Amino acid sequence: MVYNTHERVITAPVSEVGPLIDSLASQNDRLWPRSEWPAMRLNAPLGVGAAGGHGPVRYFVSAFEPGRRIEFQFTGPTGFNGHHIFTATRLTDSTTLLRHELSMSPTGTAKLTWPLFFRPMHDALIEEGLDRAENEFSSSPDAAHRRSLWTKILRAPFAARMTRKQGAR
């Protein structure tokens, strides 16, 4: 069983942080670090049943509470059996816990691809998304996740492809 959690305390009320979750996969996505990673794309507006993913990771929205929580159920890659969730939880009137949780039971080749490839990429992507959230509400936006050497090596072929695609626009 894999249980992977990332969280950040954001100095803003939940009424302001929650809409970051609601912006996922939209033209004005304020949470997903899409300039550096494959964008999250869905086949319908954010809501239960919308399906899509990012890069090779596929899922559908299995639960959605606007401004509070969204859950995505994995449909790919093969062997990713589980879900991932974003939540915004009120800590005080002026602080919110923004959290991402992944829970899955990998099978087959996913037992190898999750720890060697997907986990380091996932961890960097989520931390960079949390940086975006923190920086949006900070008076001195300087949160910046540092990618590990292994993540940089894994990203190299994809980063070059993304740069070419962005240059073609």
Image (cartoon, grey):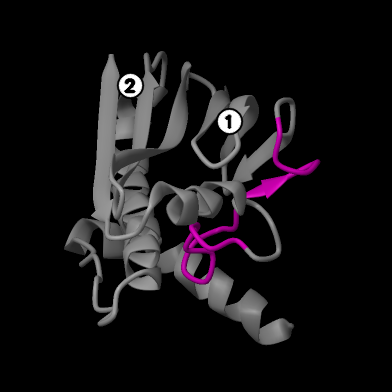
Q: How many callouts does the rendering have?
A: 2
The amino acid pointed to by label 2 is: Lys
Q: Which residue type carries mark 1?
A: Glu
For label 2, the SS is helix
Magenta part mainly helix, strand or loop? Answer: loop
Depicted 169 relative to depicted 2: above or below: below
* Residue at 55% over, 29% down: 72
Q: Is residue 61 left or right of residue 116?
A: right
Crowding at dot 1, Cα within 10 Å, few <14 / some 14-19 / many 20+, comes out as some
The residue shown at (39%, 66%) is: 132
120 or 142, which lies in front?
Answer: 142
**Residue 111 marker:** 2
> Residue furthest toward the right?
44
Q: Residue at x 44, y 53 (%)?
A: 17
Q: Quadrant of the N terminus?
A: top left
Magenta stretch holds residue 45? yes
The image's mark for residue 152 is none
Give x and y (percent) for residue 101: 35, 31
In the picture shown, does residue 163 fall above or below 62? below
Residue 65 — which label?
Answer: 1
Residue segment shown in magenta: 29-47
